[in-house]
Image: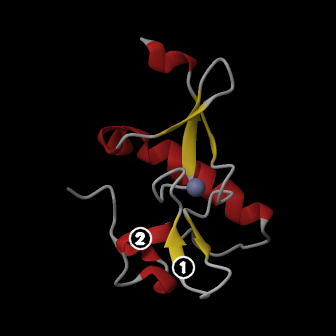
Amino acid sequence: MADALMLITRCPSCDGAGWYADEDTDESRTCEWCGGVGYVYRDAESIDHRIPPSDYERLTPTLERLEIERLREMGYSGEAKKPWEQDVRKGTEGGVNPYRE
Ligand SMILES: [Zn+2]
């Protein structure tokens, strides 16, 4: 299975946040690179690929672990909030839990 060679790595575009603030309008925008997941597959050639929604469920434990690591790095010691749980994303495309159908 080709998946075995895939690493899951923090999205280089949004640095794991899944979104970024638009510099002009200050609005939050879903990261187009990772589709708002915050993480991407990195293959054996170090090429990044968006994680397809069909893989989210399978990857949930891994993504949650990575998210906790990321928040710790940022000095955040509280509970990990997934991008779609963040208040800033409520009512936006990014506020929808991609793990739900
Ligand atoms: Zn991203």
Residue 13 location (% of width, % of height): 66, 54
Q: Are marks 2 and 1 in contact (CB under 8 Å)?
A: yes
Q: Which of the 4 quarters of the picture holds residue 40? A: top right
Query: Badge 2 local density, few (<14 within 10 Å), some, or many (20+)?
Result: many
Q: What residue is pinned by disc 1? A: 28
Please give the name of the residue rendered at 61% of the width and 64% of the height, measured from the top-left corner: 17
What's the distance in space between the residues labelled 2 and 1, CA to CA? 9 Å
Colour pattern of the rendering: secondary structure
Please give the name of the residue rendered at 29% of the width and 39% of the height, measured from the top-left corner: 54
Q: Which of the 4 quarters of the picture holds residue 28? A: bottom right
User: Split into 4 quadrants, where in the image is the N terminus?
Assistant: top left
Mark 1 lies on a secondary structure that is: strand
In this view, the residue in front, 14 or 56, is 14
Say left or right for 16 vs 4.
Answer: right
Residue 38 location (% of width, % of height): 56, 55
Residue 81 location (% of width, % of height): 52, 71
Residue 79 location (% of width, % of height): 58, 72
Say left or right for 58 vs 18.
Answer: left
Position above or below: 44 against 76: above
User: Split into 4 quadrants, where in the image is the C terminus?
Assistant: bottom left
Query: Badge 1 local density, few (<14 within 10 Å), some, or many (20+)?
Result: some
Label 1 amino acid? Ser
Which dot marks residue 49? Answer: none
Q: How many marks?
A: 2
Q: What residue is pinned by disc 2? A: 94
Mark 2 lies on a secondary structure that is: helix
Please give the name of the residue rendered at 37% of the width and 40% of the height, measured from the top-left corner: 52
